[in-house]
């Protein structure tokens, strides 16, 4: 009986066996298959390996390697079901090239329900990392060398952090026609022009010549089905545009709001905070956007918008010390600022 059960188990899960490797080598993986890997990165204080989960859908025909990564911040979970569903709905026989998805980039952060890495550092500020450096620098360096550097394109999935909420928006270099197109096909509420001149994963990818966007998918530490589904549809549209997948008809979507820059507004005193506008609201210069009272309920401070703009994200944490975030305000781009993107908006999309 035991042998029979083991035989059935092996048959049911034969295509789901997980291979442990030291480096992702897409060229060595079988075509027309889905391969699940654990990539060795670093070790914890007991000498146990910390391994990166990677799923590769490899088509039978040659083509680009498109990467989708999630949970670079350990509390940003909406991207995980996105990549799961993307893999589940992608047939290797219809795919050209390879789809490489990483459900969780920050494995220690996810397990500890925290945004940062084990040493308290934000991983998205240290790319491409450095061998011989701190824990987070070594981890980032090995993410790059062992898993990320083989990618031709990247969509890095994020959310807001604890105590804040986001609309569905995309950060991208809108002066680059490829990333502008990738951003538009995601069909977000807002597209924020954000040149990649920093130590983020997207910045490192872009500076090495691999087009990349950041997709901000709603709120932290939850699964939001509507946001997940919209992001999944957007990624499939990007893959279809690159001729990696067959085109599918898409329902019409509202035109995204374009922002040429953004800024967070911060509290200059402490107290109980109420942020008044909702996500995607357009506020006018001088409009009251938040009120702060002390523990006795007496009004301490009213905050006003420094310029006209759109609410990209906001704080939902009432207890706010001096320096706490209030609201992420996008500066509305002037007409014709992004001529390339405006031309793309006039094109028919799949």
Image (tube, rainbow, N blue to C red):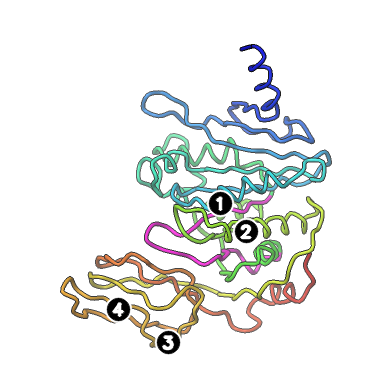
> What residue is pinned by disc 1?
79
User: For numbered disc 3, what is the local secondary structure?
Assistant: loop
Mark closer to the chain start, 2 or 3: 2
**Crowd around label 3: few <14 · some 14–19 · many ≥20 (10 Å):** few
Depth order, front residue of 111/197: 111
Mark 1 residue element: helix
Q: Which residues are magenta?
A: 153-177
Q: Position of residue 194 (x, y in %)?
A: 55, 66
Q: Which residue is located at x 58 percent, y 37 percent?
A: 145
Q: Nearer the viewer, residue 108 or 199?
A: 108
* Residue that mark 2 sits on: 231
Number of the label disc, if any, that sits on residue 291: 4
Location of residue 46 in the rendering, given as x and y in whole percent from the top left corner? 37, 24
Q: Are marks 1 and 2 in contact (CB under 8 Å)?
A: yes
Closer-to-camera residue (251/148): 251
| Numbered mark located on residue 227 in the image | none
Q: Residues under labels 4 and 2: Cα distance?
A: 33 Å
Mark 2 → mark 3, Cα distance in angstroms: 32 Å
Count up the numbered dots: 4
| Residue that numbered label 3 is attached to | 285
Quarter of the figure with the N terminus: top right
Q: Within 10 angstroms of label 4, few (less than 14), some, or many (20 or more) residues?
A: some
Q: Position of residue 344 (x, y in %)?
A: 74, 72
Farthest front residue in view? 1
N-terminal label among 1 and 3: 1
Are the residues flagged by discs 3 and 4 in contact, CB closer than 8 Å? no
Would you identify the image quadrant in which residue 136 lies? top left
Which numbered disc, 1 or 2, marks the residue that appears first in the sequence?
1
């Amino acid at each position: 009986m035991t042998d029979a059960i083991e035989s059935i188990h092996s048959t049911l899960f034969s295509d789901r066996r997980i291979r442990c490797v030291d480096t992702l080598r897409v060229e060595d993986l079988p075509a027309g298959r889905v391969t699940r890997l654990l990539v060795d990165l670093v070790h914890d204080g007991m000498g146990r390996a910390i391994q990166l989960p990677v799923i590769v859908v490899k088509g039978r025909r040659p083509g680009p390697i498109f990467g989708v990564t999630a949970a670079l911040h350990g509390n940003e979970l909406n991207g995980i079901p996105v990549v799961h569903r993307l893999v589940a709905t992608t047939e290797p026989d219809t795919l050209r090239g390879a789809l490489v998805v990483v459900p969780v980039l920050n494995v220690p952060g996810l397990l500890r329900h925290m945004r940062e890495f084990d040493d308290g550092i934000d991983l998205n500020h240290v790319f491409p990392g450095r061998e011989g450096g701190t824990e987070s620098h070594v981890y980032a360096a090995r993410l790059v060398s062992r898993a990320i550097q083989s990618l031709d394109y990247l969509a890095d999935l994020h959310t807001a952090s604890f105590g804040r909420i986001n609309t569905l928006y995309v950060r991208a270099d809108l002066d680059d026609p490829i990333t502008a197109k990738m951003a538009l096909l995601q069909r977000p509420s807002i597209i924020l022009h954000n040149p990649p001149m920093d130590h983020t994963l997207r910045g490192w990818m872009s500076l090495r010549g691999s087009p990349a966007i950041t997709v901000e998918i709603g709120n932290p530490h939850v699964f939001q089905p509507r946001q997940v589904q919209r992001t999944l549809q957007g990624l499939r549209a990007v893959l279809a545009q690159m001729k990696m997948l067959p085109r599918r008809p898409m329902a019409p979507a509202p035109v995204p709001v374009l922002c040429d820059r953004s800024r967070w507004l911060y509290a200059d005193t402490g107290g109980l905070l109420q942020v008044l506008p909702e996500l995607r609201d357009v506020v006018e210069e001088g409009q009251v956007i938040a009120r702060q009272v002390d523990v006795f309920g007496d009004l301490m401070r009213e905050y006003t918008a420094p310029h006209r703009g759109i609410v990209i994200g906001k704080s939902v944490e009432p207890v706010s010390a001096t320096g706490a975030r209030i609201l992420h305000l996008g500066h509305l781009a002037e007409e014709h600022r992004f001529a390339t993107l405006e031309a793309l908006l006039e094109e028919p999309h799949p």
